[in-house]
Structure formats: C-alpha cells, structure tokens
Amino acid sequence: MSLTKREVENVAHLARLEITEGEIERVVENLSSIINFVDQLRGADTGDVLPMAHPLDMSQRLRTDEVSESDQRERFQVNTSAVEAGLYLVPKVIE
Amino acid sequence: MEWETVIGLEIHAQLNTVSKIFSGASTAYGAEPNTQACLVDLGYPGQLPVLNAEAVAKAVKFGLATGSKVARRSVFARKNYFYPDLPKGYQISQFELPIVETGKIEVVLEDGSIKVVGLTRAHLEEDAGKSLHEDFAGMTGIDLNRAGTPLLEIVSEPEMYNAREAVAYMKTIHTLVRYLDISDGNMQEGSFRCDANVSVRPKGSEKLGTRAEIKNLNSFRFVERAINFEVERQIDILESGGKVVQETRLYDSVKDETRSMRSKEEANDYRYFPDPDLLPVVLEESYIEDIGKTLPELPGQKRKRFIDEHGLSAYDAGVLTASRELGDYYEHVVGRLGGDPKLAANWVSGELAGALNKAGLDITESVVGPQALADMLGRVLDNTISGKIAKDVFEAMWNGEGTADEIIEARGLKQITDSSAIEAVIDQVMEANPGQLADYRSGKDRLFGFFVGQVMKATQGKANPAQVNDVLRKKLAG
C-alpha cells in the first residue's frame, strides 16, 4: 500500500509539521514503506489474540483520590512569555 | 413533505472527585486562575498520568445503575487536536474500549409515558482548560484549573425524536448522576453539559439524515431551543433543495440560533491511539460487585414505589423523585405523620416547593424541616385546623413564628368543631341575609356557596368545612 502526497500533507497539517516541497517525496516514500511493514503483519492470523493496548503485560495501578499538589503557579509561569491576572496569554483564538 | 427529527446526546458529567483524573491537583471550583494546575495538567515533558481510583469507581457506579456492561478491561486513548486550552496537544479519553457500554435509560415523558433510550457507551476522559477571550489586549487568556478534571461522557443512541424528549432524557441523566453522587450536576459551573447530534429525515425513512453537532449546551432550556432552531434550519435547507453539511455548530443563546464553527471542521480527524502512558484498566469481578452493593435506590425504583406503595399519581411521584433529597424529605414527613402520603405529597410539592422557590432555597436548606411540617399536617388530620388554615400556619412557621401548635395556640386558630357553635353562627348568617335565604329556598342553589363563605367569614375560616356544609344544608332546607 502506498500513501499519496495529499494524504501525507494532510497528516502533516494535522500534526502541525512543516514539510517543504523538497522533502515531501522522500517522506511519502518512507512513510509508505512503514505502512507496508504493517501490511505484512496483517497477514498473520490474530483471530484468537486480544489486541495489545500496551507493550507491558500489566494493568493500571490506581491512586487514592487525594489532593497532593500545592499551588506553584509563580514557579511555573516563569517559563511562559506572557501572563496577566494569573492567566497564560496566547495569540487570540476565536470561534 | 413530513419530516422526522432524530437526536442523540453526548452528555459530559464532571465527576465529583476531590483531585483530578490523572494528577493530585484539586478540582475545587472557583479558585484563582492556574493555582490548581500542576505539572501533569500543564503537560510538562516527562510527567506521567496516574489514574484516580475514585473516578473509576464512579464510572462503574453509573454503568451498574443503567444496567450497562461494565468492561473488565478498558483502555485509555489519545484524542489528538491542537487548542491552547489543551496543553499536551491531546486529550486522554477512551475510544475503542470504554469502561461502560450498551445500557438503557427509562425516561418519563411529560405525558407520564415511559420511553426507553439506549446508551451506546460512557467513557472516562479529562476535561480541557478554559479560554477567556475578553480583555487581554488582543490575546486570549488561558486558565488550566479545569484541565484534567474527570469527565464521564455519556453517549446515547440516536433515539430521541423531538427536543422535549431530548430534554427529558437529559433531566433523567442529571437526576441519576446526583442520586449516585458521582457528579454535582451544577450546570452554571459547567459540571453538566451536552452536545446534541441533530438530523432530520423524511418521515418513514430508515436512513439517518446528515447530522450537525451542536456543542456545549449548558442548560435544559438551551438544549430545547437549540434543537428546535437546528431542526427548522435543516428542514428549510432540504425543502429548498439543498444539502445539510455535516459540521459542528455553536448555539448562541442571545440570538437564539446555531452557527457553524468552521475552525473546528478539519479537527474532526483525531487520530486516536492507545495512550502509552497508561496501562489497560482491569477490573476484578469482586470489585464491581462491591460497588454494586453501594448503589442507592434509583430514581426509577423510588418513583415506582411511591406509585405502588404510597398510591401517589405518576406526576407527584415524578416531582418527588426529582432529587434524592426531596424524596428523603417527603418520606421523612410520611414516616412521622404515620400515614396519608397523598397529603404529605401535596404539601411537599405544593406549599413547601412554592416557598422554597420563592426564597431561592434548595430542599436541604428548607426553613421548615420535615418533622415540623409533619407535626403541622398531623393537626390537619386530627381536625385541629382545616386545610385552609394550615396554609396560614405554614406561612407563620416559615416566618419563624414557632411550631405549628404554638402558632395555632397564639393565634387562636383552632378549628370550631362544636356543632352547637357552628349552628349558632349559621343562624346568625341566615338571619342577616333574609333576601338570599328566600332566593335560595325558591331554587337558586348557587347561593349555597355564598352562605358557606359567610359562615367561614364569621368564624375567620376556623369552622370545620365538612360540618359547615352538613349543618348548613339542613338548616337552609328549612
């Protein structure tokens, strides 16, 4: 199975990755060959196999419902470029 | 052409845990912005989510209460999209293997009939933060306190056929989550909101029409209005030969219309995949059984019991089971009164509900408690006061003038049941109104009410109405 240039462009856009005109052909080729590996796996009979959700064969540990984090806003907001009234400021998004 | 509307709802109920679904930050509402957003909620690199046991338990509770299949194994997945109030670039949700699948909800419609709505699934996920679009010099402000708050997304089958059914279904779920104490259901604070999938098709057609998804409806009234607007919009398009576009729309409550959210159209490709940061959630049989034992009597069961055992009407039973606290109050009154559930029901859903409503209070904040109300109603049952006087007594109790007995005593409201006293009053009234008496005796039966009124007036409403009727009828007959 081979991906089209359009499909790759679409996935790149959804992932907000910039792929230049010069790179696109190589990316299409590489991604297509990965998809082909997956296609080979499809040939295996997995009718009786539970789909794997995680490489570790373990189940999720749960935590007790307790507040364990204190307010560290000042420290965290040192790392951001714009703050006002405790809010992180970002370029305007509007519906 | 005749059209049929088809509606499915996705309800988001915030689970009332104290900490977030994947971190130990507080979920308390109303804190200063970003003071309850820790490194996990902020999506810092290297931070790992750890699942909150209580969020799982609450989802299981919901599953058991709706007769759904509770998955022995469920999996968290990443739902990928970019938005500033979603710092990680993905929302942790469940996709292929949700924790709850295929249940049913019995919905009581306005006419008292019961409609069964299928539940497709309910899954756990984290809420996003909040974007504030005003007042920041052309910038958007982001508050991530809400990010990571546990949500149960409850997805219905497309089995509702008008806006009122959809609202009745939403109210049923709202009541249920509060009975189960898994969500506070506070719609002003956004703890309970829904998206509506709406489509229309020619009546009789099996195939679903193209749907629009209306996002973020946070009141029952808006759900009804938004659906009604959307149905008309789609019918207009189809009748003028157009095609409905599958899209996400936003309801504007000020303009009472829905409009397209074009920016999110392309975002419908979420590229879900299992979250490698979280292992599958495996639930033991014994764990699920233990949670089953903690389920309270459910609203539907309570409603049925009130109808079957208390002899209440379907309507009264519905009103009194609207919240667990209201049902408890009513049962408390009946218990203390030792009978006459119908009288208790009338008072709780009538006079008391009216007073609460007027004062803007919840049943749990009622000025008059269930014992005090029951004691007052006891005085109606033992004929100390009439039902009419009882309303005055109740008002005085509400205003803090004391217990029913104290008020009856202080105001001299004791009912007159002494028949000679009643006869004396009736004699006076007849004597004072010779014209009406003559008219009555010559066949103007309607004047009976006039005489009753006069007697009641003369006794300040204290005469026992049944006795007055009896004696008056005899005396008037001459």
Image: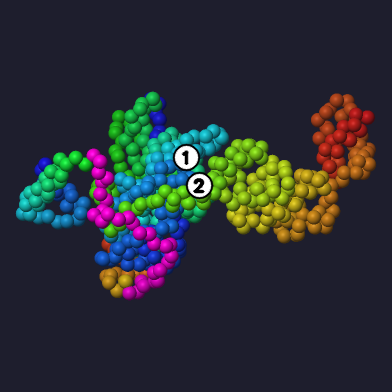
User: Is residue B223 in view from this perspective?
Assistant: yes
Residue A15 percent across, percent down from the top left: 20, 54
Does residue A18 appear left or right of residue B151 in this picture? left
Could you tell me which residue is drawn at 25 percent across and 44 percent down?
A49
Q: Which quadrant of the structure image shows residue B320?
A: top right
Residues in magenta, as a range:
A47-75
Label 1, residues with CA under 10 Å away: few <14, some 14-19, many ≥20: many
Residue shown at the point (34%, 49%) measured from the top left: B74
Q: Name the residue under label 1.
A: B105
Inspect the image, locate mark 1, and give the three-letter code of the amino acid beneath it: Ile
Q: Earlier in the sequence, mark 2 or mark 1?
A: 1
Q: Is mark 1 on a helix, strand or loop?
A: strand
Q: Where is residue B176 in the image (x, y as percent from the top left)?
A: 50, 47
Real-space Cα separation, disc 2 to disc 1, in angstroms:
10 Å
> What amino acid is labelled 2 in the image?
Leu
Q: Do discs 2 and 1 share a chain?
A: yes
Residue underneath mark 2: B176
Q: Classify residue B207 by image quadrant.
A: top left
Tell me: B338 left or right of B296. Answer: right
Q: Does the magenta stretch include residue B176?
A: no
Left/right of residue B343 with respect to residue B432 in the rendered view: left
